[in-house]
Image (cartoon, rainbow, N blue to C red):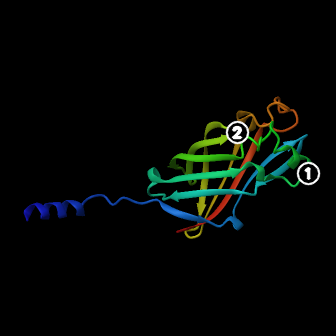
Amino acid sequence: MRYYFIVFLFTLFLPITAVANSYSIDYDNSHISFTGTHADEEFTGKFEDWAATINFNEDDLENSTVTVTFQTESAKTGNAMYDGTLPHGDWFDIKNHPEATFKSQSFSKTDIGFQVTGILSIKDIAKEISFDFQLDGDNPTVMTASFPIHRLDFKIGAESDAAAAWVSEIIMIDIEVTASKM
């Protein structure tokens, strides 16, 4: 009997572990877009087909995870020439690489919000990236982030514009995701 009482007391003083919350994304009010320049003219596009799995708790960053999958054929700019070029082998090569992914590895708190580090894979080229993001609201929560990627790191346009003479090497990624705890 004494043993059970000691076990009971011990469990009362165990630290309470926070659990990462699963989120449901409001895709109608969320977007992942990209901006660059072509011949010194700015262009903006977006991925029209993407999905994410979000398990996040700011009090349990160690167990928080995010996975995002982009359908590369869904990258659209609204410019017929660009939209006709993006699917080809030198750019997204959608025939051989229909998906791109981001998988988080770790999260940390920053002065203005959070930072996530993870693996971005495009055209089967995996690179570790880190970017800051902010959260606004509790339920729903809006996550915003803006960060650069180097397109040549992923061999996007590497054959036709390896010197970035026509298309900027740095492409800005802008994310706004509205999600609710499940």
* Residue at the limit of the structure toward the left, as seen here: 2
- Would residue 149 appear left or right of 38 to someone viewing this image? left
Label 2: how many Cα within 10 Å (few below 14, some 14–19, many 20+): many
In which quarter of the view is residue 46 placed?
Answer: bottom right
The residue tagged 1 is 80
What residue is at 74 percent from the left and 46 percent from the top? 172
Residue at x-position 8% and y-position 65%: 1
Q: Residue 107: where, in percent of width, then height?
A: 51, 48
**Circle on res. 105:** none
Marker count (numbered): 2
Question: At 59% across and 42% down in the image, what residue appears?
Answer: 119
User: x%, y% of residue 120?
Assistant: 63, 42
User: Residue 123 got which mark?
Assistant: 2
Q: Residue at x 40, y 60 (%)?
A: 18
**Dot 1 crowding, Cα within 10 Å, few <14, some 14–19, many 20+:** few
Q: Amino acid at mark 2?
A: Lys
The secondary structure type at the circle numbered 2 is loop
Please identify the residue farthest to the bottom as the structure is shown.
Answer: 139
Callout 1 secondary element: helix
Q: Where does residue 19 sit, x and y in percent of width and height?
A: 42, 60
Distance Cα–Cα, label 2 vs label 1: 23 Å
**Left or right: where 8 falls relative to 52:** left
Point out residue 99 in the picture as x, y percentages from the top left corner: 69, 47
Q: Is residue 127 left or right of residue 151?
A: left
Q: Nearer the viewer, residue 48 or 13?
A: 48
Q: Earlier in the sequence, mark 2 or mark 1?
A: 1
Query: Answer yes or no: do the residues labelled 2 and 1 have beta carbons within 8 Å?
Result: no
Q: Is residue 27 above or below residue 161?
A: below
Identity of the amino acid at label 1? Ala
